[in-house]
Image (spheres, rainbow, N blue to C red):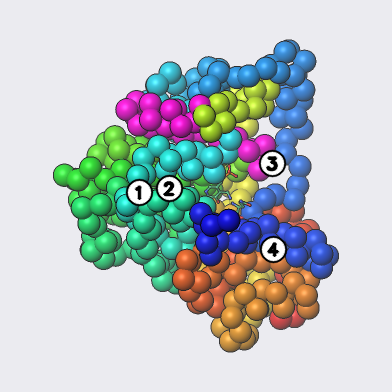
Amino acid sequence: IQSKLPGVSTTIFSVMSKLATEHNAINLSQGFPDYACDPKLIELVNKAMKDGFNQYAPMPGSTFLKETIAEKVEKLYHIKYNPETEITVTAGGTQAIFTALAAIINAGDEVIIFEPAYDSYAPTVKLLGGLVKTYELAPPGYAIDWDMVKKLFTAKTRMIILNTPQNPTGSILSSDDMKSLIKLITGTDILILSDEVYEHLIYDEQKHQSVMLYPELKQRSFIVASFGKLLHATGWKLGYCLAPERLTEEFRKVHQFNVFSVNSPMQQAIADYIKEPKNYSEIGNFFQQKRDYFRNLLAESRFKLLPCNGSYFQCASYSDISDEKDTDFSMRLIKEFGVATIPVSAFYQKATDHKIIRFCFAKENATLALAAGKLKNV
Ligand code: PMP
Ligand code: GLN
């Protein structure tokens, strides 16, 4: 069979989590919490099932959940999205990304991606016959020089994918970044896919720069969010896409044949839960404490920590420890030291190796302490 994705193999997340299990290593690789989500949330799922939410939800999502999302967004950003026409509930952020791209990208269209990047973007673009134009970000700051981005523009540029806070680097976009972006795209018909799944995981009093805060960006953007991150329940695979009506119409044309609709009782439970802002308002502080705890522990190691302004990922350079390839180094960390991480080269299509690995700190403090104890010996 002729592969539609030659050169693509099993994602690094599956590979590393499997290796962690096989070698009985502490798994700081794939991003997911190792602690329970709020028991109240589980009670609400049971309740929704008992209350009969067991058949198909409406295609674009439960009305109650879409309305609750609209309220949450308005409270946080003072921006209105119409639940009827501008909000679609999806099977996690991943499906929202896939569906938005499938709705827009034609063969030959070019999509600009900032690497290192979440690993689903490039293969999805390629599957659709699109061309990936890559801007490589450089450590330690991973800043964007927008004049260089402009050089990637051609008549075929259809979309730019943003991700702030960023996976895997933990960097965030500033209001100056957004202003530069606006200057670049004003007068073009380039669309934006803004992956904001870590919107709440932003630290040190900094403000999340959602594209929705900028009318010139909002009117051309699909915004992707994930309840997996918000509720410490990545296995639920629920999220949503915000987009103006003309974009949502196209999104839903694909969504209805991709999944039709997503898990009904959980949509009901999530709506009940996030109706109370206090159920999620502390999540930023919660993860900031974990970041600080983990960074302090690693300060005693030979790893050099990169800045982490958002997300639940901490990147570190091991260039003082070894000059092995990052893939080899992370294999050795699993086998010899019992800690699984992600080699950051996995997030570049060219496998660019800056000798940096990514740790996920969405873990019990005891797990982080145990891991740090092992990492001090490296
Ligand atoms: N985008 C980014 C940047 C992510 O890190 C993730 C989760 N790993 C997703 C999208 C996908 O989110 P979900 O698990 O809700 O599909
Ligand atoms: N987003 C998670 C990470 O970056 C994992 C997502 C996945 O396993 N597909 O680690």
- Residue at 24 percent across and 57 percent down: it is 153
Q: Position of residue 151 (x, y in %)?
A: 23, 63
Residue highlighted by disc 2: 128
Amino acid marked by disc 1: Ala
Q: Are marks 2 and 3 in contact (CB under 8 Å)?
A: no
Q: Secondary structure at mark 4?
A: helix
Q: Residue furthest front?
A: 1
Q: Residue furthest top?
A: 51
Image position of 109 with respect to 90: above or below: below
Q: Is residue 243 magenta?
A: yes
Q: Position of residue 100 (x, y in %)?
A: 43, 39
- Residue at 25 percent across and 39 percent down: it is 216
**Disc 2 and disc 4: Cα gap in Å?**
27 Å
In the picture, which quadrant includes the N terminus?
Answer: bottom right
**Disc 2 and disc 3: Cα gap in Å?**
27 Å
**Number of the label disc, if any, that sits on residue 107:** 1
Residue highlighted by disc 3: 235
Q: Earlier in the sequence, mark 2 or mark 4?
A: 4
**Disc 3 and disc 4: Cα gap in Å?**
17 Å
Q: Earlier in the sequence, mark 2 or mark 3?
A: 2
